[in-house]
Image: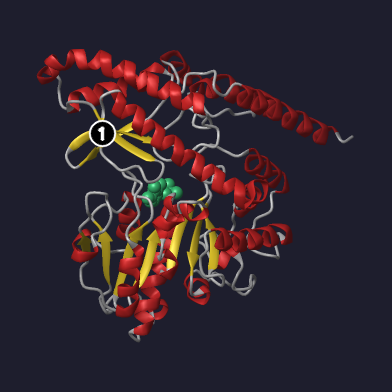
Amino acid sequence: MNPDLSAELDVLAEADERARRYVAGIGRRPVFPPDDALRNLRQFDEPLPQRGEGALATLRLLDEYGTPATVESNGGRYFGFVVGASLPAAAAADRLVLAWDNGALGHVTSPAAAAVERVAGRWLLDILDLPRDSAVGFTTSATAGTLIAVATARRAALKRLGWDLDRRGLGGAPQIRVVVSELAHVAVRKALRVLGFGADNLTVAPADEHGRIDPARLPELTSATILILQAGEVNTGDCDPFDQIVPRARTAGAWIHVDGAFGLWARASAHRDLTAGVDGADSWTVDGHKWLNTPYDTAMVIVRDAAALAESMNSDAAYSIASADSQKNLTFEFSRRARGVSVWAALRSLGRDGVADLVERTVAMSTQIAAGLREAGYTVHNRVVLNQIIASGATDAETVRVISAAQESGRTWFGGGVWRGRRVLRISVSSWRTRPQDVRDLIDLLGELRRQHRLQSADDHLLPDR
Ligand SMILES: *Cc1c(COP(=O)(O)O)cnc(C)c1O
């Protein structure tokens, strides 16, 4: 064999072996890395080598000092943010895609990727029960998907008003209003900011005690409005009442976008009623890398008017003309990773039943955690309809201490937040690896911490507000 090729195969085998060791060790390391592992990250702080250090030595350094300083989010005891782990089929498919190294802009650069992503898109519309002739773009994130969807919505709204955005730009264009929930995710606010919708141009829709837009207080909608709804609020997990809001918005002629980063997956399960009426919207974003448990950089933007998305994201040039459903004409990227392949692999390996089971199992565990927390004396602030739990101890200071102690324990990791002025701990159950034992361990730990930190509450006034 050609010696270069043989060296390459050695490196791949080494990477494979080290990756397998990492996965085999899941559940046995601290969930957040200890201080010595963090200090050792200094090992990476070296000058750029003049002469290359070689592939094997480079890989070894990464594993030796990188691995111990990872967070075990690819495990069952991590309950922070809404992250999910990686399903074996999805992670393995991504590895094969790496070997292909096809830029997946369309058929011309990868017939395989184009075909598989087309099927993944079709299956996605099927499992989420969204309009079947929508276009599906595989993007890096729900943030990017929202940017794409809102840019498409604005372009379409201006077109209806007789304004050609592509030619005339935004200067002097008719005003398009955006209505968002007071609890819209920061990623949505960022997408709007980047698109030039300043905070003062947003009309904020008040939310109820479950974190859902209150239909009785919905601002006025017109055909020059983009209304952004939410499936899965990051604190409560609740969904806006689509069946009450969507018909009104449609009658007004507004464009309805739904941020369903994780919550839209409820639709693939016995909890689908939470999302009743969501299929009446015009566009949706949903992540693969959260609840579907694909590797990172995998999300979808879905637009009912396929032509509107393909026109808005068109990147055809004389040397590269592709069909309207080529991914380069549905997303930002021209050169791109075939990120839809891991979605295809996840859906094919789980099937409809497996996805429903993943969602239903994690929701059931969330309900169990909420019950355990109540029993341990915490106040649970949401009604736990999906996979999010927010809870607090007797005082803000106690809650903050419990969060830090849990993070430092190495036995779990979750973060905190603020809900209606109270400090809360935020727990999200979104990993396919989370087992009943992980849930029991979490409840036990939180019980212990509550007992320890309640004893200190007399000192609360001494603590700086963090
Ligand atoms: C995570 C999240 C986002 C952002 O998604 P990314 O894929 O991380 O960009 C947006 N909205 C909600 C509700 C989320 O939970």
Looking at the image, which residue is at 42% across and 55% down? 260
Q: Which residue is mark 1?
A: 424
Left or right position of 234 against 3? left
Q: Quadrant of the N terminus?
A: top right
- Amino acid, disc 1: Val
Q: Residue furthest bottom?
A: 162
Q: Is residue 322 above or below residue 411?
A: below
Give the x, y percent position of residue 194.
Answer: 33, 58
Compare residues 238 and 15 and report the one nearer the observer.
238
Q: Nearer the viewer, residue 332 or 149?
A: 149
Q: Is residue 422 left or right of residue 446?
A: left
Q: Position of residue 225 (x, y in %)?
A: 29, 73
- Colour logic: secondary structure
Q: Residue at x 37, y 46 (%)?
A: 385
> In the rendered picture of this protein, how many numbered marks are placed on residues?
1
Classify mark 1: residues with Cα within 10 Å, few (<14), some (14-19) or many (20+).
many
Q: Nearest the camera: 433 or 462?
A: 433
| Res 313 seen here | yes
- From the viewer's perspective, is residue 121 above or below residue 55? below
Q: Classify 399 as above or below 91.
A: above
Which quarter of the figure is the C terminus placed in? top left
459 and 128: which one is in front?
128
Residue at 37%, 40% in the rendered image:
388
Q: Position of residue 184 (x, y in %)?
A: 29, 54
